[in-house]
Amino acid sequence: MIDPTAPHAAPARSDPADDEGERALRALFDPRRFASQGSATLELLASHLGAAASRALEPVMPREGPAALCEAFPARFPARGDGDVVAVMARALTASTSLHAPGFVGHQVATPLPDAALCELVAALANNGMAIFEMGPAASAMERAVLQWLSSRVGLPPTSGGVLTSGGSLGNLTALLAARQAKAGADVWRRGLRNGPQLVVFVAETAHYSVARAARILGLGDAGVVAVDVDAELRMKPDALAAAVAAARRRKHHPICAVASAGSTAAGALDPLEPIADVCAREGLWLHVDGAHGASLALSEKHRARLRGIERADSIVWDAHKLMLMPALVTAVLFRDAGAGAAAFAQEAGYLFDPRGDDDGDAWSDVGKRTVECTKRMMSLKLYACLQAHGTQLFADHVDACLARAQALASLVRARPRLELLVEPECNIVVFRVRGATNGKNAAIRKRVVADGRYYLVQVHRPEGLWLRTTLMNPLTTEGDLRGLLEEVEAAAVALDA
């Protein structure tokens, strides 16, 4: 191992560009300086984690608004700085929303494992771009291993493959590109849509907005996205899907894909995947499962049955930066047929990809052939390293704990007459509100709770009104914290009535 304290070797010869600016830049690469700055950075982050454990990270979300923060971080930069990057990071950390705070129960973003953050440092310094194997050898091999393991967890066959990409939105776009290529009836990638029939994708009315956005990016337009009715539990109705497909065919449209949710964003609903897969098989549709949030239930012996039917999907999106404790972003796009994923991006780029072919048999090593991204981050390292170092059971236990926490919160809500649940939680998302309160009042309650600083929760708009929404994925959150949250919600409701 290199000793960062060892004397730094002098250059063997002078450099014609060896002026003051170049010397200053080279000094920033001195391993002794890096060790010193790194130590100070780790002390900063360790202090942050300590404050989270002692419940001292308040307010969870900074009280300053956009204008004040823009003033705190002005667009003015010195010609020569003092080199104190740790001071800048400290200011940024203080002004950031504290996801490690036990009162953070807001958006679907993981409270990341500290070890995973260390992996991010290594990935950033190595900076292997991964478009081709030569630019990301270790990252490519780790990505392949991670994808094989994730595919096995959801029951995909050995023919499966995929890619890691930057977030569920890009993941859904990648999957729908493959669906369009496979089911359009023509080589859309090369020939374009031309004057063929209207292609149609079917989504639950509760689906994440990125699905409809992806369909429009693919050129399908408004008519290419058909919303399917949901039941009282906000799950797609298979009969409604079948009826929507039949209606599209009567209009001479060409159905290509149905998108089911495994953990919808609004309320964590799990669509009935088995009967939806039956409809897709009967109608010849590509089945895509947006499991960005809920696919992690496949890790749990206790809860994986809730995903029954996911093994029949043609493609699946799975976010490790949700229930797998990873820093954003690391999304797996899994394909039942690895070739279908590659076909979505079948193009020549002789300056990058070797036109003579690959030497790895199934063309997995040049990742750029299977994703929108070219210079792709080394995102496999954090997931692979944490799986290796801590084992798979850690993640299964975390999923179980998150779902148990959600059930505990739902029970606490049911026990309080002033509050009501939107639906019984199916995963780790719990949606509730103050019973009888107007939309404006529930919004004001949330604003008051967040401003108080101990808790951060969000809101969701539904046809029946505005609701308060929580996502339970923080390992530091206890049932006592959940009781405190509901007490603050009720206290805010009383104060607004006064």
Image (cartoon, rainbow, N blue to C red):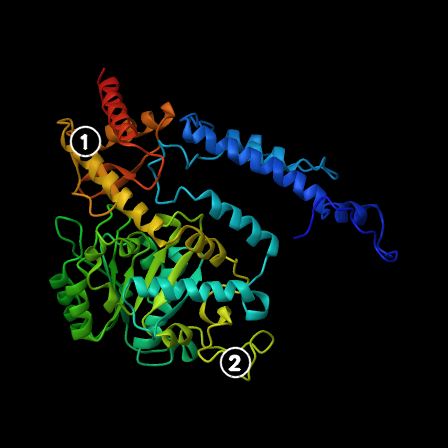
Left or right, 381 with reference to 311: right
Where in the figure is residue 99, as x and y percent of width and height? Answer: 41, 37
Asked if residue 363 is positioned above or below residue 380 in the image, the reply reads below
Marks 2 and 1: which is nearer the front? 2
For the residue marked with disc 1, what is the amino acid? Leu
- Residue 412 is tagged as 1
Count of number-bearing discs: 2
Image disc number at residue 383:
none
Q: Amino acid at mark 2?
A: Asp
**Residue 273, picture quadrant:** bottom left
Identify whether 333 is placed above or below 205.
Answer: below
**Relative to residue 47, is residue 205 depicted above or below?**
below
List the single residue furthest toward the front: 1
Residue at 78 percent across and 45 percent down: it is: 24
Residue 241: x percent and y percent? 16, 64
Q: Quadrant of the C terminus?
A: top left
Q: CA distance from mark 2 to mark 1?
A: 58 Å
Q: Secondary structure at mark 1?
A: helix
Identify the element where label 2 is drawn.
loop
Category of crowding for the residue at label 2, using alpha-carbon neighbours closer than 10 angstroms: few (below 14), some (14–19), many (at least 20): few
- Between residue 231 and residue 126, name the one nearer to us: 126
Residue occupying the point 19% across, 67% down: 277
Residue 248's image quarter?
Answer: bottom left
Position in image of residue 357 (x %, y %): 52, 82
Residue 344, horizontal then vertical, whole percent: 40, 73
Q: Residue at x 38, y 25 (%)?
A: 453
First of labels 2, 1 by sequence position: 2
Residue found farthest to the top: 498
Camera-side residue: 67 or 133? Answer: 133
At a point 22% along the width and 43% down the height, the residue shown is 462
Name the residue tied to disc 2: 359
